[in-house]
């Protein structure tokens, strides 16, 4: 894991106050670049997320099957070519893809998904603008 990427998790995601756990991993190998403490997503789950972005079916398979993080199932409420929004009760996940990275962010029950999504989109747009 690279030190520079950890700053994106700590400042750009957790620092917003809208995200409580996050992982940044590679698109092609889904290996973690940076993680928040205790948010270690198994390889198979990161791989499934990465592969869902290549799914050209409509609706995407991940919408019908849901998304698993550490064995917990989240209901996917929206999936596009570069984003996933999922919920489990009032908490949720926002997953965004750039050219080289996948941002996986968890928000607590007291934060609305659109608010969390906006926080993660800011980092996604920055990374796209600098070539990632």
Image: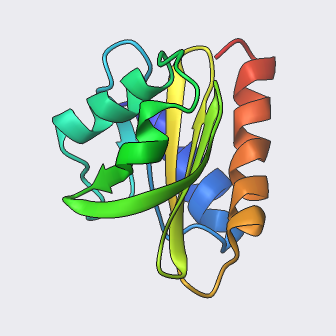
Q: Is residue 102 left or right of residue 99?
A: left
Residue 28 in the image: state x and y as whole percent.
38, 12
Q: Disc count in the image?
A: 0
Q: Quadrant of residue 117?
A: bottom right
Residue drawn at x 76%, y 64% as measured from the top left: 114
Residue drawn at x 71%, y 12% as measured from the top left: 131
**96 or 122, which lies in front?**
96
* For residue 35, above or below residue 89: above
Q: Is residue 17 left or right of residue 115?
A: left
The image's colouring method is: rainbow
Q: Could you tell me which quadrant the C terminus lies in? A: top right
Q: Quadrant of residue 97?
A: top right
Q: Is residue 76 visible?
A: yes
**128 or 111, which lies in front?**
111
Q: Quadrant of residue 47?
A: top left
**19 or 66, which lies in front?**
66
* For residue 79, above or below residue 9: above
Q: Is residue 24 visible?
A: no
Residue 77 in the image: state x and y as whole percent.
59, 55
Residue 84 in the image: state x and y as whole percent.
58, 43
Q: Could you tell me which quadrant the N terminus lies in? A: top left
Q: Is residue 55 left or right of residue 1?
A: right
Q: Residue furthest bottom?
A: 110
* For residue 100, above or below residue 50: above
Residue drawn at x 51%, y 23% as measured from the top left: 53
Residue 104 in the image: state x and y as whole percent.
48, 46
């Amino acid at each position: 894991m690279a030190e520079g990427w950890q700053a994106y998790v700590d400042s750009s995601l957790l620092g917003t106050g809208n995200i409580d756990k996050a992982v940044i991993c590679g698109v092609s190998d889904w290996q973690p670049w940076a993680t928040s403490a205790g948010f270690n997503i198994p390889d198979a789950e990161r791989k499934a997320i990465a592969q869902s972005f290549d799914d050209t079916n409509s609706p995407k398979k991940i919408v019908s099957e849901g998304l698993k993080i550490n064995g917990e199932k989240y209901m996917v409420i929206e999936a596009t070519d570069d984003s996933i929004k999922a919920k489990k009760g009032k908490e949720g996940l926002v997953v965004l893809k750039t050219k080289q990275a996948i941002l996986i962010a968890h928000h607590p029950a007291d934060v609305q998904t659109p608010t969390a999504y906006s926080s993660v989109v800011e980092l996604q747009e920055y990374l796209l603008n600098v070539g990632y």
